[in-house]
Amino acid sequence: MDADVTDSAGTPADPDLPAGDTPQGRSQGRSQEEPGAADPKEEPEPGAVPENDAPQDSGDEGEAGAGEDSEGGGGDGDQHGSDGKGTVGAQTWADHPKDGSASRRKRPWLRWAALGASFLVMISAGAGWWLYKKLDGNITTDTSAAAELKVYEKERPTPVVMDAQNILLIGSDSRSGDNREYGRDDGGSQRSDTTILLHLAADRKSATAVSLPRDLMVEVPKCRTGDDKETREQFTQFNSAFELGGTACTIRTVERLTGIRIDHHMVVDFNGFKDMVDAVDGVEICLKEPIDDKDARLELPAGRQTLNGEEALGYVRARKTLGDGSDTERMERQQKFLGALVNKMQSNGVLLNPTRLYPVLDAATKSLTTDPGLDSLRDLYDLVRSMRDVPTDQVQFLTVPRQPYRQNVNRDELVEPDASELFKQLREDKPVAVVPADELKEKEKGKAQDEKPDDAGSDSESPTPTPTYSGSSAADDLCEQ
């Protein structure tokens, strides 16, 4: 009887499964040539469990249930199923080679793609870190100025508006080192060729740059020299403060003159300015007359043209052969050129494009000396980023109100009360306006004609007008003036 059952039904039925649903029967639904398929004519030993029903192979019904409906769920060969009675079907080893081999074919590509992406990320991160460290290392920190200012802290002004920033920009005229080609090296002594007080409004909607004439007669306080000696307090021309006591002495002189607390300072030499102009591919200007200045090594035709770094340096330094030869006119030329430089940086998206910003930062940091509060690339970038949204017509340049000094026409003195009013506006972070000099003269002339004796006291009921000074903005076109 057993033999008959074996011959007709093949492998003995699993007592836990209904007849006709044996694992072997399901495997025969595929090709019998697949490796691992059971021989239907081979009789197992009594009581032995068929290989296809081994515990580690159970869990899937394979392809036998494909397309068949049962009470427990459909028979997808890739999903676990049941026979409707809670019994989980088994999957033969014949199911694995087809799916497994496809997965193995895909995995190497995925692995290589992941490795490639990781490598690119590592390279990019490494290059970015190297560039950051390079720029950061370019900056020179002026710790001696910070130490001296700390000694005189009690006499320094108190900040009025905390979020506003006042930065003193000093252009050094030292002829030592790489700068000796621009003049005689007098043993390393230097004076501030250009000094600008840059006021950034607390809301960062305006920036006002005020030039301080180097020949302005001022009170210079007692200062410590490089060899730790102390100079006497004296009334002398402004740029001698830098020669006597360096940056700290210049800062204290400006603070005494204006009552404005200086938050940071930057000292830039000739090469730094020149390289920055080259980094933005030159700056466009307009000349009403040709220039031929041997001292400035500058020869330019009249008309619209783009100056490279070397030409730009000669243009802002030239004095004797341009205009009336005064330092006041040279400062106005410097202001207009700086405005054109700012306009070029903003209009070309330099401040918003890291690729184009890098050469500018590299040029600036190489020749830059700052206080410890601005001596890192992060500090400088935060400063630049805070300024990039300032409208160009609100980046204003002017010279402190001045006139020839009464005792020496080759020196300058402040015009009062105009100068004090300007300093008060900046100190309290209030707006100022600038217009071209000829326009300001017309405005003042019209105002004088409109004033009448019986109008006294009427201005007290009207809002205080914004003080207006002779100057320019970064939005001005140098060829339309």
Image: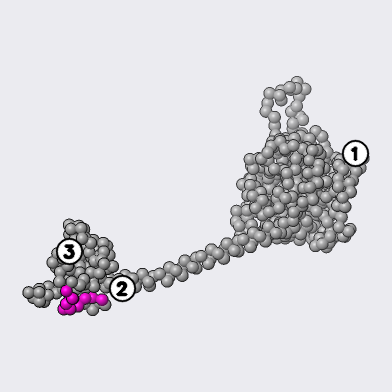
Residue 406, numbered circle? 1
Q: Is residue 42 above or below residue 208?
A: below
Q: Nearer the viewer, residue 419 or 18?
A: 18
Residue 404 in view (yes/no): no
Q: Are marks 3 and 2 in contact (CB under 8 Å)?
A: no
Circle 1: element type: loop
Q: Is residue 233 above or below residue 364?
A: above
Residue at 70% over, 50% down: 374
Q: Nearer the viewer, mark 3 or mark 1?
A: 3
- The residue identified by callout 2 is 97
Residue 313 lies in what quarter of the image? bottom right
Q: Nearer the viewer, residue 352 or 225?
A: 225
> Marks 3 and 2, Cα distance to the nearest angstrom?
28 Å
Check disc 2 and give the amino acid type: Pro
Measuring from the top left, give residue 394's x and y in whole percent.
Answer: 66, 43
Query: What range of the chain is rendered magenta?
Result: 36-46
- The residue identified by callout 3 is 16
